[in-house]
Image (cartoon, grey):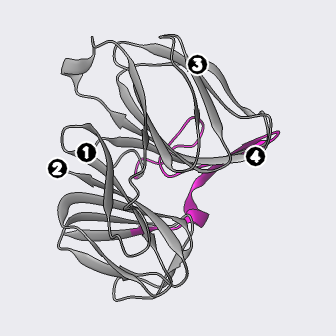
Amino acid sequence: MTTEIRRGSARFASRSPGMVTSHAFSFGEHYDPERLRFGPMVCHDDHHLGAGKGFDTHRHSGLDIVTWVVTGRLSHRDSSGHEAVVSPGEVAVLAAGSGVEHAEHATPDGRARFVQVWLAADPDRAADDPTYAVTPVPASAAPGGGLVELVAPQPGAVLSVARLDALETLTLPAAPLVHAYVVTGALTRSSLAEPLAAGDAFLFADEPAHEVTAAVPTELLVWTFAG
């Protein structure tokens, strides 16, 4: 049973003109042997892009890539013929399977922020054809609605969202692994930690359910993993 708090200020940062990314785990030139993965999660990035900025065509394989747009709009195009513009209130899942090339950019009309997670796929899916889908967030994902499941990109891995009013309390579920990320807003001080701000995260391993309380209107992205 362990609880870890990862502060946004401790994330690795990559910067280029019109782009800033904060990495929760080792990525590229940023390496820390203590921060390699959390269950199947091998990447948890928070991207800020200027209008029209982003990532030109590049290749992935053996990953499930889950994208949550916070503000602005994000365009996606891949070598399997999928094209989409993802807006706040939608979640996109790219299953790279045997391999796919894709590009992602903020649309030319404004800046964008998105949170993206890479999950290592099971080796038995290595030969699968790539897939891509955009799913709208249920209307129940609203203050008072609790934790609302969004997608389950692979067995035992579930992404949920909670949108909380100020002083609203949420129960984070018990699971072998739980990753709870403060996208916007803040959580009050609790028995677990000092207040958490946007960019901070709880990482629970074999913990019981825990209650958290929003200090201000807050959005949380919560992953649960079976192991």
> Residue 227: which numbered mark, if any?
none
Q: Is residue 119 magenta?
A: no
Q: Secondary structure at mark 3?
A: strand
- Horizontal side of 151 relative to 133 (left or right) equals left
Of the two numbered discs 4 and 1 in the rendering, the one whose residue sits closer to the viewer = 4
- Closer to the camera, 17 or 27? 17
Which mark sits nearer the N-terminus, 4 or 1? Answer: 4
The Cα atoms of the two marked residues, 4 and 2, are separated by: 36 Å
Q: Which residue is mark 3?
A: 58
* Callout 1 amino acid: Ala
* Callout 4 amino acid: Arg
Q: Are marks 1 and 2 in contact (CB under 8 Å)?
A: yes
Picture coordinates of residue 104, whole percent (x, y):
62, 29
The Cα atoms of the two marked residues, 3 and 1, are separated by: 25 Å
The Cα atoms of the two marked residues, 2 and 3, are separated by: 30 Å
The Cα atoms of the two marked residues, 1 and 2, are separated by: 7 Å
The Cα atoms of the two marked residues, 3 and 4, are separated by: 21 Å
Q: Secondary structure at mark 2?
A: loop
Picture coordinates of residue 216, whole percent (x, y):
55, 82
Q: Classify 42 as above or below 7.
A: above
Q: Which residue is mark 1?
A: 157
> Residue 111: which numbered mark, if any?
4
Disc 2 crowd rating (10 Å Cα; few below 14, some 14-19, many 20+) is: few
Q: Secondary structure at mark 4?
A: loop
